[in-house]
Amino acid sequence: MTSLSSISQKEYIQRQHTFLEQCEPNSILVIRSGSETPRSRDTDYPFRQDSDFYYLTGFNEPDAWLILSNRTSNHGDVYRAMAVRPSDPEQEIWHGRRLGVEQAEQQFELDMCFANSEIDDGLLALLDGHDHLYWSLSHHVESDELIQSVISQLKASRTAHAPDRIIDWQPKLHAMRLIKSEAEIALMQKAADISCEAHKRAMTAAKSVGFEYQLAAEIHHTFAMHGASAPAYNSIVGSGDNACILHYTENTDELTHGDLVLIDAGAEFQGYAADITRTFPISGVFSEAQGNLYNLVLDAQAAALDVLGPRRTLAQAGEVAIEVLTQGLVDLGILQGDVDGLISEKAYRRFYMHGLGHWLGLDVHDVGVYKLEGKDRPLLAGMVLTVEPGLYVPNEPDIPKAYRGIGIRIEDNIVITEDGHHILTDKVPKSVAAIEALMAGKA
């Protein structure tokens, strides 16, 4: 099990340096990887590396540790160390190859590498003499006790010096992760391209399959055939009023001619996620009511995209989308009243109950705070986010009958640039005409 990352080792090392530069003097960072998770007796879920550990290392094996020090008091102090699973021919026959200690030290250009079975003694030696320990309590609960034990042993020693302060590393590291490098954006573009192909395949297959899970299979097949190891999250294939369930993942119902189907699915490529939603008619042709609602959501997305760029905020774009959606709901007779009053009362939330978007990266809902000192965070070049307005009309008697039970969401992924934004997911159709043309075999 080795890393497939195409990001250079130089970039990973630079990330480690950048983090240490932000730390207090004489500090040490300890961060551990993910572990395999049992699925059932004698089987595990497919391993997925902890995103923070992967961001700093690109190493894709379980049960590893990264230890970084900015201590400069004595020449020769360890600066960059890892603990990894040692080579074990018998285990590798059963469970796959391991990089091993010697290869890891060379590949990651480490000052020290040792077997993870020696982590207790390793931490005792490496933490000694540092004033500050960067460790995130509860990030890996099973390791908190070990860290506390090591500190206690150091404090009890007459010759050792234990860190007297534990600092959570997450805020600093997550702020770093929020701004993507060129290499990261290239991987996210690849994830987006694969996901676009999958959504187009689903559109062209919709009339020839019978169930939601079969459309999901078309999506997942395309992911795999284009080199994406897995979906970035549980795919949503909601037909009919299932589309009004925001996190519908059963994907078991039969597809009905005349209904829309909402597909929210994205590939994960080398750890990075895409997150696309398209809504289209199973028959290949929108009804008038479906088209009216669809174009309203599309108009809301277009208005929001016009706002998004450097120094603007996601909240500003969200307010614009709400204005368009509310006005449209009034125009269609779904809401009644003054638009400004309806917005003030948040009447739209009956039909649009989520936010406009979220950060995207190694995690689908990626890390990074949305407010700084209580104010909406300004967007900066290199930030990647989703833009996903929607409408979910309940099947209730006060709603015009033609619109009942229709759920629509349109979601794209964008990267903020110096002069605006770039849409990563523009290769999958989203206008009524383009969708109908693709499904008719004319595009």
Image (cartoon, grey):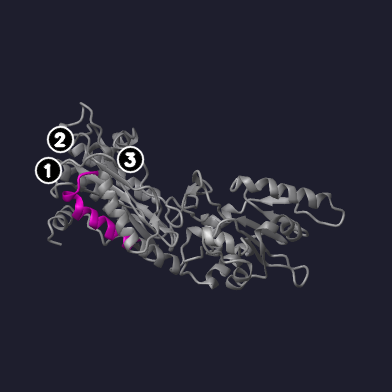
Q: Is residue 111 above or below residue 269?
A: below
| 3 or 1: tag closer to the N-terminus | 3
Counting other residues with Cα less than 10 Å from the Cα at mark 2, is it few (<14), some (14-19), or many (20 or more)?
A: few
| 3 or 2: tag closer to the N-terminus | 3
Callout 1 touching callout 2 (CB < 8 Å): yes
| Of the two numbered discs 3 and 1 in the rendering, the one whose residue sits closer to the viewer | 3
- SS state under label 2: helix
Q: What numbered label is drawn on residue 77?
A: none
Q: What numbered label is drawn on residue 250?
A: 3
- Give the image location of residue 379, x and y in percent: 43, 57
Mark pair 3, 2: CA separation: 26 Å
Counting other residues with Cα less than 10 Å from the Cα at mark 1, is it few (<14), some (14-19), or many (20 or more)?
A: few
Instruction: From the viewer's perspective, tell me whether residue 137 is left or right of residue 284.
Output: right
Q: Nearer the viewer, residue 48 or 284?
A: 48
- Give the image location of residue 270, x and y in percent: 44, 62
Q: Nearer the viewer, residue 38 or 14?
A: 38
The boundaries of the magenta stretch are 192-211
- Give the image location of residue 53, x and y in percent: 56, 58
Kind of residue at disc 3: Glu
* Residue on which the image places disc 2: 402
| 1 or 2: tag closer to the N-terminus | 1
Q: Residue at x 62, y 50 (%)?
A: 136
Q: Is residue 105 above or below residue 387?
A: below
* Residue on which the image places disc 1: 288
